[in-house]
Image (spheres, helix red, strand yellow):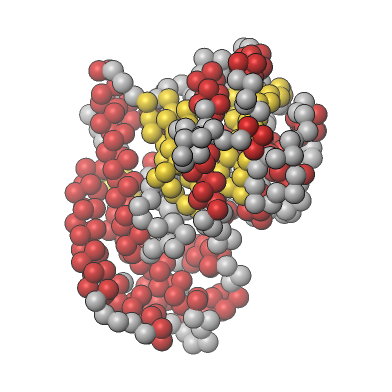
Amino acid sequence: MTHATPARFLGSHEAIATFPFSPASTAPRRGRHAQLLQRQLPPPRAALRASVIIPAKNEVANLPATLAALAAQVDADGRPLPPDSFEVIVLANNCTDATAALVRRQARRFPQLVLHVAELCLPATKAHVGCARRLLMDEACARLELMGCPGGVVASTDADTYVAPTWLAAIQAEIAAGADAVGGRILTEMAGAALLPLRRIQVRDAAYGQLCARLEDLLDPALADPWPRHHQHFGASLALTVRAYRKVGGLPEVRFLEDEALCQALRRLDLTVRHSPLVQVLTSARRQGRVEVGLSWQLREWLHMSRQQREPHVDNPAQLATLWQARRQLRAYWNSHPVLTHPALAAGLGVRAGALLARTQTAATFGKLWEWALRQSRNTAVDVLPLSLALLALPRLIKHYEFIANDLALISVSPASQADSFRAVA
């Protein structure tokens, strides 16, 4: 299989995920379906700085609220965004309802919103969210390039998702601060007694993700993604610059989890993904979605588990901690431009010291080096354990490493000995 598996969706797996995606070219693709899409859209407006894309298949029930939220976008001071500064493009693909007609009615309802819709009937082999989102993001990128805007923003959301009033402004602020991509916090609309067991699991899983994000920040902090941050970067709220999109060669065209594959491609090239708590959306809790594996699939799994009185299993946080420590050590080694082997680091990773030195000296990016280490290592496997046990372990781990971090902060570390401080944390 050339993309993420359903098990990938069960936990964060951020330290160990790899996707065998390497773009053949950064040039725009213009296949038949891309041309059909482009022909249905008017030229971009001169002031365009952000393009919001929404794949939609039979979404008449959900799109009115989604588009109304986008029509109500304001800046940080509550002022409406300049209407020509962003557009919304909906792709109604393989629909059997009046999705496209609905979007046209909404365009008349919100004349201040620059809203476009295109219709495509994709063949069975391409009738999936990865292809639809790829077509949209390619077109959005090309439109921003046409306006001479390589720093422009391609922002993705879903047809059953309501973005916060400052969603786009918060994305643009994170991009302006230096992020190449921004993952938004995705909250789930879930009410009613029947969904209470599902809600309990969802809340506990979110707590696990947040605690893992805190632990990762303590062990391998990212300057471009500082705490506070969250753990999500999914298609319901995922944005990146035109420049970053072209650099990775576009969205991986896979049947599901294309958003995860895109973020891995960004990391492979050391492009930054900011998990901003200021960027928020609310998405539906429907269990019959439009993709094979996604939130709806996960909610069905959790509901089935709750009825059988089972709980989800997640990555062992103690093993994740070890892996994140190793990643920090390896980054320090790579940044030092080494000429000598590092036997202790090689042993910890489970690779040969000579091979590690050679790869470190030739790796163009740290992301590529880490990807190589994960493939070669004998020591990077992460087991799973029940969610309840992970939630007991995480606060203890966080407290332990917070104590170490505070202790190290009291010690003045010279630049020459900085690599040793990385090893001290491990």
In which quadrant will I find the C terminus? bottom left
Q: Is residue 156 above or below residue 212?
A: above
Residue toward you, 50 or 127: 50
Residue 96 position, x and y percent, is 63, 13
In which quadrant will I find the N terminus? top right
Q: Quadrant of residue 22?
A: bottom right
Residue 39 position, x and y percent, is 80, 29
Residue 350 position, x and y percent, is 41, 71
Residue at 70% of width from left, 40% of height from top? 47
The number of numbered discs placed on residues in the rendered structure image is 0
Residue at 33% of width from left, 64% of height from top? 219
Residue 265 position, x and y percent, is 58, 53
Q: Position of 109 compared to 30: left or right?
A: left
Q: Position of 204 compared to 61: left or right?
A: left
Residue at 38% of width from left, 80% of height from top? 418
Residue toward you, 93 or 21: 93
Q: Is residue 35 above or below residue 243?
A: above
- Specify whether residue 245 is in view: no
Residue at 49% of width from left, 87% of height from top? 340
Residue toward you, 342 or 404: 404
Q: Position of 297 compared to 49: left or right?
A: left
- Specify whether residue 117 is in view: yes
Q: Is residue 66 above or below residue 272?
A: above
